Amino acid sequence: MDRRQFLAILAAASCRTALAAYGDAGGESAGPIAQSQQRSTAGSAESAESAGGMSAASPASSASGASLAMHRDPDLQPFSSASVWNAGIGSGARWSRPEDPDTLDLRAPSTWINAGEWSMPFYVGAATDPLVTVTCTDTLYPVSPQRIHMPAGAVPAMPVNGDRHMNFFDETQPGLMWSYWGCSGNTETGFTAALGTVDHVCADLPGDYNFGIGTIRQWELDAGAIHHALRIVLPTSRTRSPGSTWTQGIPWPMSHEDYNGPTEYTGNVIFGSTIGIPASIPLSSLGLTSGGLLLATALQTYGAMLRDTAGADGPLLFFAEPSAEGSVVLAQMRSDLPKIQALLCVLRNQSPGTVNGGGKPIAPTPLPLKPGLC
């Protein structure tokens, strides 16, 4: 079964699941470092494809279409079905008002979706690919040197003076996801990163230093469906620190903000906030393109989380993987961003006891991960 057949089956399965009874959201635990590094021998993936000079993450193969329709591959959508990232906004969600200071700051800056540059490349390595050492130099949240299969020629996100993110899956270690920031090097000599995390794909919560979570993937644009929360960035002038230190009072499910957040943030949106479009807003009446409706539906059904900041004059940012640059659907999303941004609100009751607002998730129950991983 090839990649196109797989994505068609997965998209159809998502549609069928949407007609099923809704499931309950589950809780999760916090922490910026990997929760587990156990190895699993189940599953195998196709080799990574090259797109636009980047190797895009490839789906894992399966023995039959029936199996694919019943399970989720972690290199396409990681983390548990109960994860706050996958469970969907709840019917009990309470939202900020249009006149609230944080709503105004959320809607005020320009907005964009990073893809070709300043974004999140994903690489899936096969057993025949180079085994490369990635060394993280962070001493506050240390990650031991990791040996990861990755496609030859894998490179960090552009530009060369940017954040230089890299995200990895390895067919020989199918239970893990690696995410790094500030990468330099190559697949011949190895990579060095300034920050990073190693997360188990079955966990409820990725580490705070998982930079890839919430990225719009190329396969999702192809399938016309996004079934997870998104990652956003706001400028420091629109962001607020809830405490006097970078770990004090951070909204669940995050555990810390930028180290200098308490002195650098001057806005009103608390770092770590969950944002979205209230369910009461009829998206079909807004005159959105098909791409814009795809993005707006994801924000209404799953929301987004403030995971990072930009400079004081920066925009509100979403992220799509680099291979999405040039996509018609991405262009449609970008063209509709002003309409979508004008609808965004801050979720007032995000907590372990009221995941995504609590109540019945308005999203369909996510497909479980492939057997043998968890």
Image: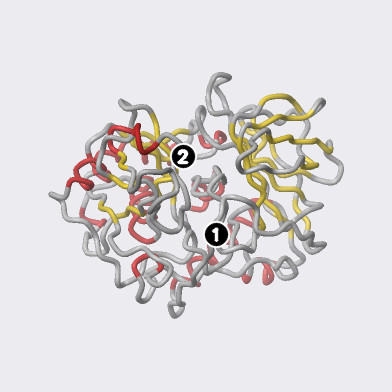
Secondary structure under badge 2?
A: strand
Report x, y in % for residue 268.
25, 43
Number of numbered callouts drawn: 2
Q: Residue 314, relative to residue 351: is it above or below?
A: above
Residue at the image position 40 percent from the left and 59 percent from the top: 302
Indicate the quadrant where residue 363 lies.
Answer: bottom left
| Residue furthest out toward the right | 128
| Residue furthest out toward the bottom | 21
Label 2 neighbour load within 10 Å: few <14, some 14-19, many 20+? many
| Residue furthest out toward the front | 244
| Residue furthest out toward the top | 161
Report x, y in % for residue 262.
36, 38
User: Can residue 267 be seen at all in this image of the molecule?
Assistant: yes
User: Can residue 225 be seen at all in this image of the molecule?
Assistant: no
Residue at the image position 39 percent from the left and 31 percent from the top: 310
Seen from the viewer's position, the closer of residues 139 and 220 is 139
Disc assigned to residue 205: 1
* Numbered disc in front, either 2 or 1: 1
Disc assigned to residue 319: 2
Q: Residue 330, relative to residue 220: is it above or below?
A: above
Seen from the viewer's position, the closer of residues 289 and 353 is 353
Seen from the viewer's position, the closer of residues 55 and 214 is 214
